[in-house]
Amino acid sequence: MVAIVAVLAGMVGTSFIGSGRHQSMEGFAHRMAQRVELARDRALQRNKEWGLYVSEGEYEFAEFDEANQTWEPYALRPFNAEAFATDVLMEAEVEEYEGQVGAEDDALPDIIFFSSGEVTPFELSMHPIGDLTRVWLLESDGFSRVRAKLKER
């Protein structure tokens, strides 16, 4: 009897831990969608191109400096990277755009937010390290708002 109670308690505890992790990931995905939309708005408001670099457990927003022709990191709130990102694998798939193919500069951001309000069409997939069962997707055709969607495998 005691063994059965112990097993059941372990199963319930594990499901709560897993549930908390899923909720944290869901929150992160929605916050990233909001950051992407904020970056698009900021590019439009400032009449400057903005970008997003994505690399596994890291992301970084940047603003294009026309005077120096460089991408300058922008890490002020709300664009600063949050600690939870280190527990997340992120991958950006971006449609090719003019200037990207054959560009000598490999330092272009993965996703660019243009001052016209457009964004390079992309799909950003995110999932917790070691968990491929639930993948969150952020995507845009270049014009539509970005929203977080869950894709369960």
Image (cartoon, rainbow, N blue to C red):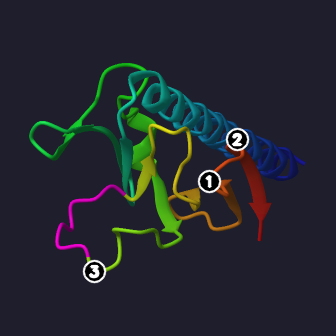
Distance (Cα) linking label 1 and label 3: 21 Å
Front residue of this view, candidates 147 and 31? 147
Q: Are marks 3 and 2 in contact (CB under 8 Å)?
A: no
Give the overall secondary structure of the magenta segment. Answer: loop
Q: Residue furthest right?
A: 1
**Kind of residue at disc 2:** Arg
In terms of sequence position, does the residue under pointer 3 or pointer 2 come before the other? 3
* CB under 8 Å between discs 2 and 1: no
* Image position, residue 27 (x, y; %): 64, 33
In-front residue for pair 102/87: 102
| Callout 1: SS | loop
Mark 2 vs mark 1, CA separation in Å: 9 Å
Q: Which residue is mark 3?
A: 102
Badge 1: residue crowd in 10 Å (few <14, some 14–19, many ≥20): some
Percent x, y of residue 29: 62, 42
- Image point 46% across, 22% down: which residue? 45
Labelled disc at residue 142:
1
Q: Which residues are magenta?
A: 103-109
Q: Which mark is residue 33?
A: none
Give the amino acid at mark 3: Gly
Q: Quadrant of residue 153?
A: bottom right
Query: Percent from the top left, x then y, of residue 135?
Result: 67, 60
Q: Residue at x 49, y 29 (%)?
A: 44
* Residue 113 falls within the magenta-colored stretch: no
Separation (CA) of disc 3 from disc 2:
29 Å
**Three-letter amino acid code of the residue under disc 1:** Gly
Residue 102, picture quadrant? bottom left
Q: Which residue position is annotated with label 2?
A: 145
From the viewer's perspective, is the residue at label 2 or at label 1 nearer? Answer: 1
Q: Residues within 10 Å of mark 2 (few under 14, many from 20)?
A: some
